[in-house]
Image (cartoon, helix red, strand yellow):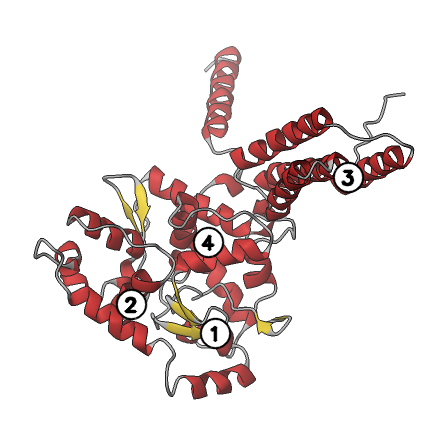
Amino acid sequence: MASQNIRLGPEILATAITAITVALASAGWAATASDFDAAYRAAAQREQQAGALRNQWTPTEAALKAAQKAADMKDYDQAVVLAHQAEALANASIKQAEEQNALWRNAVVK
Amino acid sequence: MTGRAGRRYRWQWIALALLAVALLPASAEERTDPAADQRAFQAHFRHAFPSVALNDFANGPYAVDKGMRKQWEEIMQFPPYEFALDRGKQLFETPFANGKSYADCFPNKGIGIRENYPYFDQETGEVVTLDLAINRCREKNGEKPLPYEVDDMAAIDAYMASTSRGKPFDIKIPDDRRALAAYENGKKFFYERRGQLNFSCASCHIEAAGKRLRGDILAPALGILASFPIFRTDWGSLGTVDRRFVTCNQQVRSVPFRPEDEAYRDLEYFLSYMSNGVALAGPGARP
């Protein structure tokens, strides 16, 4: 039987990441500056891709700013959560741009 | 003709037909036909608002809601853009440091020409809006460009628009593949969803035109730019088309482009062309 690709929606992914991060934090795991750097870099890279598609979202920009602010305050747990949220939002904006590239024609008044 | 020769000719015709099909655009949807788009667009609004006259679409929400129209008629006893309009006339008529003026940069000395903007410049291969032309005029005469969304730019734009009141939009799309591409870009921008709220321009101004969004009545897309620049009560000042595009994008949680970005100019080109025949009524007042 052919295998099926199961794709998680960005919102579900963001929720799952947040839940895992919160669970790890409450279990005594604490994020470090390098965890934040990696999470922020990944999110910023995806946001840059959304920019190349000319479809950035304001909540992504806000989440990136908030993540950096939390990191500046050395609250790396929160900073990592926010960076993951920003990445999920950027992924959703990329998906929207890719889908709309063809779907917009369906809305044209004929 | 022998049977074998006949078969050979038949195959040649089939090959030619296949080649012709291959050279056509992949689908009818991919062909750009602005005139057909415009007919369908205007027919949609005639059907959706049968009691609204074509020129009344320039009045946006006031054309489709009786209550709002009454309020607007009261407001227009003392139009909120009057001071800006006077200032625009003064700025327009004030010579630059080099002695030249805006009138030297435009056809007919800049009077009664708003209905022809935006236009496609075949020399530079781009869409030129009135506001872009105003700033290019300034730069050509050694003046600094003005910020695009508000203040002096909106005032000059308002004065120039006022000299075209009553003249119908007359936007041309030349038979030039670059002009057609710009038109198509504008059309795409209008119909594609963007931002976290997943709205397109068409979501509000076609699908929900005339309906309420919180306290506002959504303006029909037909004639939507015919009253620009507009004094919005929400803004408390006069604003240009760029200001509206930027705030629309922000409202759907999309990062807006810079004013006069190519995407916005193409969008203005598409929307203005769709409204050809609607008489200009700018500057205007909106909630």
The Cα–Cα distance between marks 3 and 1, rounded to whole angstroms, is 39 Å
Name the front one of labels 4 and 1: 1
Camera sees residue A83 = yes
Quickly name the residue at label 3. A14
Task: Categorize mark 1 by other alpha carbons within 10 Å: few (<14), some (14-19), many (20+).
Answer: few
What is the chain identity of the residue bearing mark 4?
Answer: B
In the rendered image, the residue lying farthest to the front is A73
Q: Which mark is residue B37?
A: 4
Name the residue type under label 3: Ala
Total of numbered circles in the picture?
A: 4
Task: Specify the subunit that label 2 lies on.
Answer: B
Rounded to the nearest angstrom, the CA distance separating label 4 from label 1 is: 33 Å
Q: Nearer the viewer, residue A84 or B176?
A: A84
For marks 4 and 1 on the same chain, the one whose residue lies earlier in the sequence: 4
**Disc 3 and disc 4 in contact, CB within 8 angstroms:** no
- Are both tags, 2 and 4, on one chain? yes
Q: Secondary structure at mark 2?
A: helix
Among numbered discs 1 and 2, the one appearing first in the sequence:
2
Q: Which residue matches tag 1?
A: B233
x and y, in percent, of residue B235 in the image? 47, 68
Which amino acid is tagged 1? Thr
- Give coordinates of residue A52: x percent, y percent: 52, 33
* Chain containing the residue with disc 1: B
Q: Tell me residue B249's x, y (percent).
A: 53, 53
Q: CA distance from mark 1 to mark 2?
A: 20 Å
In the picture, measured across the screen, residue B79 lies left or right of residue A97, that is: left
Compare marks 2 and 4 and give the one earlier in the sequence: 4
